[in-house]
Image (cartoon, rainbow, N blue to C red):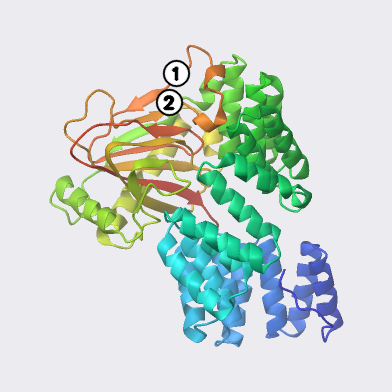
Amino acid sequence: MNTPRGSAAHPLLEEAMRLHQQGNLDQACNFYAEFLQQQPAEAQALRLYGIAARESGRPELSLKLLIQLAQVQPDSVVAYDEIALTYMASGLLDDASRALDHALSIEPNNLRALTNKGALLHFRGHSLEAIQVYREALSVEPTDIEIRCNLAKALAESGDAEQGLIECETAIDESDEHPLAVSVKATILADTGQHKEAAELFESLREYASFDESILINLGFSYQQTGAASAALKAWREAVDINPHNARAVSDLTYGLINKNDSRLARELCEGFLLRHPGEPLIVAALAYALAASNDESYQQLLDYKNLVYATPIALPAAYKSIVQFNAELANIVTEDSSLTSEPLNKATTGGSQTGELNLQPQALAQLETAIRTAVTAYCENLNEAGLAHHQALSRAGNDYGVRAWGTVLASGGRQTPHIHPTAWISGVYYVAVPEDLTDNSGAIQFGLPPERAGITNKLPENFQVETIKPEEGLLVLFPSYMYHQTLPFKSSEARISIAFDALPFPAMAVF
């Protein structure tokens, strides 16, 4: 929390800040509100109340307060930086970007705004742009360990893991082995398959795991990849004990338990989590496999391909003479996008390239978003008509949602390994260009099989079913974000181009 130290000028504000620092957000907000009734234009109170509202899950209130702060202090970088953070927390990433650009137009070398802009670009998959912004931030403050670690991760994800590790070593040397720098180095080593070395580094950070359970989650993964299944299970148990609300920890532990033939406990773990966090994609997926591994056929309700996978050709968008013309424009947008990266680290794409998040403003992408929204509406109506209104697939649905999209270009031999989209509720793919010489199911999208990293394929029943859909140009496919899917490899002289997308609910908010 960014509350200043020292004494405030008014007892109400002092008490609000004290409660805020203690994490008592609801009461802190009450005191901030009472103080602002007396002094409605007091900048410090507006900022802190805006932060507390965001931290307590009230983004609409947060945005209202921070916009009011910007009106009181129109040249305040802090106001627009905080506005951006509230937008980011709400999934309104375009608005967050505009707010940060405005902050940097006021003060181009503002360290916090540069850092947040780099983080936003990084999150959206624009690693090369993020690298540039992180370097700008380091020119302002060369000793900032967090920025250098972010730079290291962005370098690795852009395909330069070697330089990423060099930046990690610089951060480690300059910070006397700060745990963040060591952790980032270990993560890059794990991401590049050096699991023995990664496990040693993560093990050296165990004493910090009570502050950051991801250390144990990553330690477990590296142990698993080196064949140390019992050590992996122990690490994941500890991570869940530290934070039982961490979906990745619970998911990894679930697969570890299935591997140890303890599907009953795996199922109970998932069911308990979903009572607290309905529809969490990582856990719904894990529950499906826990049920399947214990021969409980109710897993088929979660992997109900007939009702839950929806494929439809899109209608010809306005302003285009043919789908061929529309798809040609989309193909050009994807292949010319500056963020297109070959086999990006931590992505499912192998034997091809993937963009970062696409800007949906150009006409063709705006029309595609319209088609996506039309399909999502039809999808939900179909599930309601099928009596599935309370299905896990709709538990995170919202009337207002954002659409994030990115492009994939696969060459001959390319594929996408099994993956899910854990931040969304409905995901999908639109086929822009499909090679004419595909045979059988090559190049198809297949649903159902978990990733190899889970290590549980041999625990599934012999009659476990998968669903395969052949790609066709102009075809749009929707499915629950928790459903594992992959692209089967193919051979062709032509590229296979698609645009994947997520629907992410967020509260209705005014935009910057």
- From this viewpoint, is residue 510 visible? no
480 lies left or right of 54: left
411 above or below 508? Answer: above
Report the amino acid beneath label 2: Tyr
477 lies left or right of 74: left
Rendering coords of residue 459 (x, y %): 57, 18
Rendering coords of residue 15 (x, y %): 85, 74
Report the amino acid beneath label 1: Gln
472 lies left or right of 228: left
Q: Are marks 1 and 2 in contact (CB under 8 Å)?
A: yes
Q: Which comes before the other along the chain, label 1 or label 2? A: 2
> Which is in the foreground here, disc 1 or disc 2?
1
Res 465 label: 1
Q: Quadrant of residue 174?
A: bottom right
Helix, strand or loop at label 2? It is helix
Please give the residue where the numbered disc 2 appears in the rendered image.
305
Total residue callouts:
2
- From this viewpoint, is residue 459 visible? yes
Look at the image and tell me in which quarter the N terminus lies.
bottom right
